[in-house]
Amino acid sequence: MRSDARSSIAIAVFVTGIAGFGGGCGNRDTTPARPCEDSDLVARVRVRSVDRVDLLFMIDNSNSMAEEQVSLAEQLPHLIEVLTSGDRDGDGIVDFPPVRSLQVGVITSDMGTGGFEVPTCTEPNFGDDGILQRTGNRSIAGCPGSFATSFLTYQPWTGTQTPETFALDVSCVAVTGIGGCGFEQPLEATLKAVTASTHPPVGRFDGAFTMGTTGHADGANGGFIRPDSVLAIIEVTDEEDCSALDPELFNPDSSVYPGELNLRCFEYPDAVQPVGRYVDGLLASRTRPGQLVYAIIAGVPPEAVPSPGEAPDYAAILAHPNMTERLDPDVMTRLAPSCNVTGRGRAFPPRRLVEVAQELDAAGAAGIVQSICSEDFTPAIDAIIEKIADVLGTACLPREFVPNEDGSVNCQIFETLPITGDITRCDEIPGRTLVATDTETGGEVCEVTQLVPSGGVIPTEPGWFYDDFTEDVLRHCTDAETDGQRISYTDGNAPRTGTLLRLECGETGEEPGGSAVVDIYSACDSAVDTVCPASEATCARNLICDPESLCWQAPCDTDANCPAGFLCATDRGTSESGAARRGRISASTRAAEPRAD
């Protein structure tokens, strides 16, 4: 059963050695003892949190886009501030894991006309060709004429820039100006920008229009798209996509495609690239569909845009009367507009862009549909932030934990609170219990209450829960190797800014359905406990009390002596900490204060 409710944050962690704050199992290195390690736990349990975002703006730079570019630039400080703080409403509470490395690139919709001389298309061959722009708009105060790199990078933890100064740099490039080719090809430009020259299938751009060229992701745009990032693409245009399959479509004197030049893409749909080309190509740019966010701010009628927090109803959007492509009865040389904004002008039905968003969404990516005809772009940017936050909040666990009889899992979350600020004590935060004082920072260490979902419904009490059932986790954490699972905070109970988080999980020594009381890696006292034989009802297998780690572990001399799925530490290197070698998970990150790699 799936729940429609969502938790506000999934814990984002980096796997490290245990940062101890007291005695107990798992706090000491182990070299003398040679226990069996759960090889699966050691090798495969890693929290796949994402804290890098590569944000690609595709900006329509045709003559009708001056006001829209300014409206987008006005929202950039808000977008960058929220993404890099994780705080949606400015209340000092982290609502989702913040971005610790943000890269922003800008391309335009100008892909030329295949060599034909057409008014407004000053670069007739390939136009801007999906290459990231470096030119700054000098009409904006403080903008340089150009930038040294093809994309801009913001790492808030360095303290070298503020969201406002970085947003100004982005605006310098994103306000591309007008005068670009009036035959907008945003989908082709986007695909070429994110596709590597060697990416299969080879020859993605070998069609007649692109004349044997290749993608730029490992060339002119090299370094922009990172393999472990969230790739967020935002298409901003007031026209329909006209990514041509045949450049003859743009020949003013064509006998193959006769008629009004301005209506060619509408009248000859077979001469335009199929939508599936862009769905397949964009999905191929990511390891998992959940790493892709695809947003359009285009000529969708404002009344067809989903309300905040709602998913797009693609069928309803495409069925809206104003989304039908038809000739304008007042001006027969153009299509009827889909929406109109006083002082800004008309926009036209972006059916192909909506269809791409729809198919990407169905494939597991995040699709967003917003209107360029809105009075301002705040709702559009908030919707984009929401989707990126959903992906950033997906700290996936690539293995399933076996729940206990009561539905809980053998994991604990500890928060070390900052020693300065409004909240510094565990008893000031719901769902927290004081367990220790951190020996390094002096801050209180709180254990966060584990909650158990019932009937596939997210708990409402303060705390965290093991999530293997919500729509969100099934969408973002399921891949070819694993079913979806993660550890999530309940709504409104995310960690406060500056909190150090630690996740610790141990596995039981039993198979599902067993009744063991003694857990492998659970605490023991070597002065009293020596051996826990499998013949005892409380033991799942022969265990020894490791005097160094004070944990129950399986004894061995070689891998052959270990149970299935376990390896002997004798055969392993000794460079890892005892905690890592024993297979305990320990992980930490500082909420809203990301650290350098």
Image: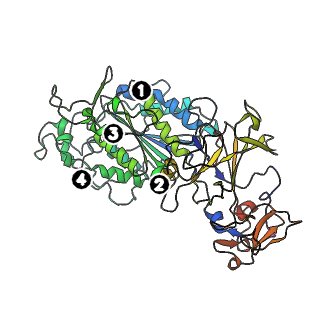
Q: Is residue 38 magenta?
A: no
Q: Is residue 33 magenta?
A: yes
Q: Is residue 229 visible?
A: no
Q: CA distance from mark 1 to mark 4?
A: 36 Å
Residue 44 falls in which quadrant of the image?
bottom right
Where is mark 3, residue-wise? 109
Residue ranking furthest to the top: 343
Q: Looking at the image, is mark 2 or mark 4 nearer the viewer? A: 2
Q: x, y percentage for residue 555?
A: 76, 74
- The kind of residue tagged 2 is Arg
Q: CA distance from mark 1 to mark 2?
A: 32 Å
Rate crowding at label 2 as few (under 14), some (14 to 19) or many (20 or more) other CA atoms within 10 Å: some
Label 2's element?
loop
Rate crowding at label 3 as few (under 14), some (14 to 19) or many (20 or more) other CA atoms within 10 Å: many
The boundaries of the magenta stretch are 28-35
Q: x, y percentage for residue 138?
A: 43, 27
First in residue order: circle 1 vs circle 2? 1
- The kind of residue tagged 4 is Ala
